[in-house]
Image (cartoon, rainbow, N blue to C red):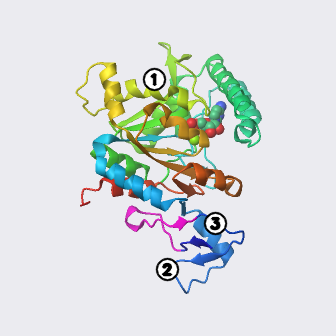
């Protein structure tokens, strides 16, 4: 039997309820409404309403053990690594697919916008195809990202165009992201936003949407270089696409954490790296199976992985529930993660 909490409400931290959809070992799918014996919802209605708010946990016991280990080690041992697009941001905004840091960009040059859109139309189906072997897909993603970066340079993207694009974009953070960052900031817990998108765009999205900065939040993503006229001339460092986040984890995480507002007391990069490496407990959040590799470079002790499964739930649930400790279905808000970190490091905790 699948167990679904029909009354889960994830609209505010005070009313958080985690509900578990446990692994279904039988072939027959039946549903039980927990907590409301008189619930009048049909199975279909229950499923529709509750998939959007439910949490899927394959191994609740293993998760509880991880929570205990991380809580016992304390906040000084902990860090958060989060993907950006469709993880911190919502997959759908006003009923339509929300924009990513890439596709919100309007270069001020319609020809180049159309060229990038044509690339998206060609490569995005390949990105989400479950049948293309990983090596082949990696090459395709490299191709897509480098062509896109070239078009942004050739098309003369300016920093002003980024600001205007973000102003006009339909990109929105999941409810609870601010509360999550605030909680982590208070506890001096670093947050690394690790994205295959565009760092400069992400920063502008944070600026315009959150209306404040967080000294504990840093971004690892494709970083632009502008000339004196604010025109894009190149990209810094190695290209980060959806399938190579692992290659960059170690070399980029160290220097980045070095710049955190948190005082490490360390002066050189090696010592700063050592500081990051002390934080061997990780909360990793992503919407893509490839996001799981974001912590590859960290040799963590305990990791809780959270997956946002926004679309194609029927097809992807099995692989997500096996890969992530928790799966939030159907573009869920961030309240579950807020509750999780509060549970880990609540000041009221005994
Ligand atoms: O932040 P994250 O790593 O999720 O960003 C990558 C996302 O950006 C991918 O899911 C991809 O679909 C999207 N993308 C895009 N346009 C591009 C390249 C990537 O929308 N040109
Ligand atoms: Mg993503």
Q: Is residue 41 left or right of residue 114?
A: left
Query: Where is residue 115 drawn, in percent x and y?
Result: 73, 27
- Label 1 crowd bin: few (<14), some (14–19), many (20+), radius 10 Å: few
- Range of residues picked out in magenta: 7-22
- Residue at numbered disc 3: 24
- Residue 251: assigned label: 1
Nearer to me, 97 or 327:
327
Look at the magenta stretch and give its main secondary structure. loop
Q: Looking at the image, do the residues carrying marks 1 and 2 touch, with CB atoms under 8 Å apart?
A: no
Give the secondary structure at mark 1: helix
State which tag comes first along the sequence, 1 or 3.
3
Q: Nearer the viewer, residue 292 or 173?
A: 292
At 30% across and 47% down in the image, what residue appears? 73
Mark 1–mark 2 Cα distance, whole angstroms, equals 49 Å
Q: Is mark 1 within 8 Å of ligand 1?
A: no
**Residue 216 seen by the camera:** yes
Q: Which residue is mark 2?
A: 35
To which quarter of the image does residue 262 belong? top left
Mark 1–mark 3 Cα distance, whole angstroms, equals: 41 Å
| Mark with earlier residue (1, 2) | 2
Which residue: 50% across, 67% down? 19
Q: With respect to residue 219, does 340 lie above or below?
A: below
Is 34 placed above or below 27 here?
Answer: below
């Amino acid at each position: 039997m699948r167990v679904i909490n029909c009354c889960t409400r994830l609209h505010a931290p005070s009313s958080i309820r985690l509900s578990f959809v446990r692994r279904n070992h039988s072939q027959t799918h039946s549903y039980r409404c927990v907590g409301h014996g008189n619930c009048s919802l049909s199975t279909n209605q229950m499923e529709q309403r509750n998939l959007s708010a439910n949490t899927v946990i394959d191994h609740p016991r293993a998760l509880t053990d991880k929570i205990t280990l991380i809580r016992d080690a304390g906040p000084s041992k902990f860090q958060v690594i989060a993907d950006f697009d469709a993880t911190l941001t919502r997959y759908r905004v006003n009923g339509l697919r929300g924009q990513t840091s890439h596709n919100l960009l309007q270069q001020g040059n319609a020809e180049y916008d159309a060229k990038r859109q044509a690339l998206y139309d060609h490569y995005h189906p390949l990105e989400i195809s479950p049948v293309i072997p990983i090596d082949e897909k990696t090459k395709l993603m490299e191709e897509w990202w480098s062509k896109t970066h070239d078009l942004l340079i050739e098309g003369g993207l300016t920093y002003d165009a980024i600001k205007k694009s973000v102003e006009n974009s339909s990109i929105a953070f999941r409810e609870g992201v601010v509360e999550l960052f605030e909680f982590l900031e208070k506890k001096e817990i670093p947050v690394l936003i690790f994205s295959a998108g565009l760092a400069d765009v992400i920063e502008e999205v944070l600026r315009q949407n959150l209306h404040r900065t967080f000294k504990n939040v840093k971004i690892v993503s494709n970083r632009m270089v502008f000339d004196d006229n604010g025109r894009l001339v190149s990209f810094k460092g190695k290209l980060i696409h959806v399938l190579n986040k692992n290659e960059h984890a170690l070399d980029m995480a160290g220097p980045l954490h070095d710049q955190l507002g948190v005082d490490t007391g360390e002066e050189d990069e090696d010592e700063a790296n050592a500081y990051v490496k002390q934080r061997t407990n990780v909360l990793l959040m992503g919407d893509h199976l490839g996001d799981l590799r974001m912590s590859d470079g960290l040799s963590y002790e305990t990791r809780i992985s959270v997956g946002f499964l926004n679309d194609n739930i029927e097809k992807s649930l099995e692989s997500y529930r096996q890969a992530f400790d928790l799966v939030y279905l159907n573009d869920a808000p961030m309240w579950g993660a807020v509750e999780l970190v509060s549970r880990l490091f609540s000041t009221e905790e005994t």
